[in-house]
Image (cartoon, rainbow, N blue to C red):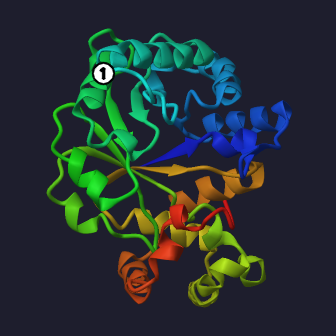
Amino acid sequence: MELCIGTIQIGMQFGAFAKSRVEADKMLEYALSHGIRSFNTANAYDELEKALAPFIKKADRKTLNIITRIRPGALFSVAPEDYYKTLKQNIKRSLSNLGVREADGCLFHNGEYAQDEAALEALARLKSDRLTKKTGISVSTPAQFDAVSHSPHVDIIQIPYNILDTRMDARLAKCKKEIHARNITLQGLLLLDESEVPRKLRDAQPIIHRLDSFCEFHGVSRLRVLLNFAKTQPRIGMVVFSPRDLTQLKQGIRDFEEDMDHTALRELADEFAMTAQHIVEPSLWQGEYR
């Protein structure tokens, strides 16, 4: 299993630009110098892709795994016969930003096209033009996963996966696609102190408390628990971690390398199995916390 760095928070903090270019450069330099070779980005974040370009240029490109995503709603109001043209324009913009000729992966940003066969087929055509080696989609629900799990046009499926959200587990054993896990911290919620949990998500406070008790007993950080939990699912090949700053990046790389007892982690997840959906699914948070 490999750790992939999601670049969104290298340049953003909860949707607002907050990082200077100097800090972004420090984070990217540190990641590359400590063995990180996979980076997850998107052409909705032009500046973030451009920030990666000089590091890609000075690294050994053959050792890097650069995955970009098509911006949300890219095919809105586009006729199916024009899907490929639009997707080609999108990925070429990313490739130009990144300073590369071909991406290692190109995904739909979310599951909005999971049931649109024409869109998936058009995305897969990008491989024929050597614009990407693999194509796929980032899904949010089991229904979306089911819609693409056997599609001949999909190589990679990115899923939400964390100690509260194991909805995909039963499906993964039967799926032959490459699986990437994202949202391991549940958009940062699982790293908050109890007092920081937003009012509408106060049902998560006992979960935070239990996590802290578990961490204290085992002498580990919460981030180590969250990263290692993804490693308990054998079908996951890559874990996407989006650090908020250099300190968290350093901790994440260190914690990912330190293995934990899988049985203890799975037992902890079992305790959270009945967690309410309005906690597990950020789409239901209604803007209370992002």
Q: Position of residue 24 (x, y in %)?
A: 76, 36
Q: Position of residue 189 (x, y in %)?
A: 63, 69
Q: Position of residue 235 (x, y in %)?
A: 27, 56
188 to 202, vertically: above or below: above
Q: Position of residue 160 (x, y in %)?
A: 43, 58
Q: Viewer-proximal residue, 44 or 119?
A: 119
Q: How many marks?
A: 1
Determine which residue is flagged by label 1. Answer: 80
Residue shown at 48%/72% (left/top)? 280
Q: Residue 210 falls in which quadrant of the image?
A: bottom right
Identify the secondary structure beneath mark 1.
Answer: helix
Question: Does the image show residue 258?
Answer: no
- Amino acid bearing label 1: Pro
Residue shown at 63%/78% (left/top)? 201
19 to 251, vertically: above or below: above
Question: Can you say which quadrant of the picture contains the C terminus?
Answer: bottom right
Residue shown at 51%/36% (left/top)? 72
Question: Does the image show residue 272?
Answer: yes
Q: Viewer-proximal residue, 134 or 17?
A: 17
Left or right, residue 159 beside residue 187: left
Q: Residue 79 falls in which quadrant of the image?
A: top left
Q: Viewer-proximal residue, 89 or 184?
A: 89
Q: Residues within 10 Å of mark 1 (few under 14, many from 20)?
A: some
Residue shown at 51%/58% (left/top)? 183
Left or right, residue 227 beside residue 234: right
Left or right, residue 115 beside residue 8: left
120 to 264, vertically: above or below: above
121 to 263, vertically: above or below: above
